[in-house]
Amino acid sequence: MNSESQLSQTANSSFSMDDFAKALEKHDYQFQKGQVVHGKVFQLEHDGAYVDIGGKSSAFLPREEASLRAVTDLAEVLPLQEDMEFLIIRDQDAEGQVTLSRKQLEIQHIWEKLVQMQENSQTVQVRVTGVNKGGVTVDLLGLRGFIPRSHLAERDNLDALKGQTLTAGFLEVNLNTKKLILSQRLATRSSNFSLLEVGQLVEGKITGIKPFGVFVELNGVSALLHIKQVSQKFIESLEKVFQIGQPIKAVIIDLDEGKGRVAISTRVLENFPGEVLENMEEVMSSAEARANRAANKPAE
């Protein structure tokens, strides 16, 4: 645009520099949407509250943004002249007034808390609020979460879960997409995991046989008996040694709760190389004494 057309545009414009200065005065550019600010409520109305946040104009907090829980008396959750934190949820209007929320701030804090809980592999109590084909919707501290059918202990009669309280672990916590996916199975595994320790003798059932090792179910936790940990002697085929559903005792040699991994060994129970292959029954029946010896403890 050349300077002539700029001048003519200025001349034709009814918006003078004075108007512009006045408009600027009304706006306070230190306050932006998404910002957390401190302020004091100085006036309560039927539809909300006016808050002094130290700006050129007072801020407004609509009634429905007062709290995450249902509010009958605004004064209960918004005491006058008390310093509080607020989240700006709408930029300034023509009068320079921003819109605030306590509810959205509470929600933000809950998400942050849940992220922390997920990092610490903690479990939570959730209430089932609804059922659909893929799983169940749950309420967690006022937030809506979801447990997929494959992560429920009861997968057939989902309707029976309505209104029930379940213990769940976290699969996904995402504040940006508001995604909260939980797992009842993960919580069961986590509580069972806390009962396990390296050197412990455990008993389980074989659930899978692969060329590299055998999977064993230990009270809701899956463990791997690697082919090299079965015996001190070389094994050609695990399928010739084990069967699906077979009970087995073994010693835990490694634990990784974060990845849900448990490594177990029958090799450490052997008195001589190949004993597990030649006389599995004898090794299993005296497993406790053998495990104690392997841990350098006197046999009981």
Image (cartoon, grey):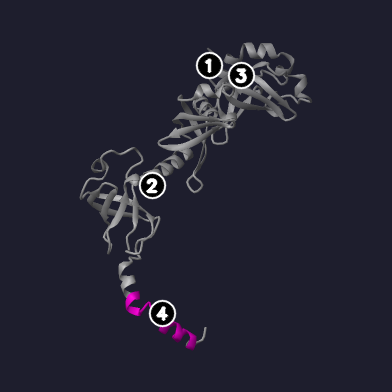
- From where the camera sits, is residue 129 visible? yes
Q: CA distance from mark 2 to mark 4?
A: 41 Å
Q: Is residue 52 left or right of residue 139?
A: left
Locate residue 230 relative to residue 130 in the image: left or right: right
Q: Is 277 placed above or below 22 here?
A: above
163 in relation to 96, above or below: above
Is mark 3 in CB contact (under 8 Å) with mark 4? no
In front: mark 2 or mark 3?
2
Depth check, mark 3 against mark 4: the one in front is: 4
In what element is the residue under mark 4? loop
Q: How many marks?
A: 4
> Could you say whether the residue bearing mark 3 is in a helix, strand or loop?
strand
Quadrant hosting residue 55: bottom left
Choose the circle earlier in sequence order: 4 or 1.
4
N-terminal of the two: label 2 or label 3?
Answer: 2
Q: How busy is the neighbourhood of tag 4: few (under 14 within 10 Å), some, or many (20 plus)?
A: few
Span shown in magenta: 4-20
Q: Which residue is mark 1?
A: 298
Q: Which residue is mark 2?
A: 104
| x, y percent for residue 216 | 64, 23
Do callouts 1 and 2 mark residues in contact (Cβ within 8 Å)? no
Foreground label between 2 and 4: 4
Q: Secondary structure at mark 2?
A: helix
**Along the line of sight, which residue is nearer the eye, 144 or 258?**
144
Mark 4 — residue? 13
What residue type is disc 1 on?
A: Pro
Q: In x, y percent, where is residue 58?
A: 27, 59
Q: Secondary structure at mark 1?
A: loop
Q: Position of residue 213 (x, y in %)?
A: 70, 28
Amino acid type, residue under disc 4 in the picture = Ser
Badge 2 local density, few (<14 within 10 Å), some, or many (20+)?
Answer: some
Examine the rendered structure and indicate whether residue 16 appears above or below residue 40: below
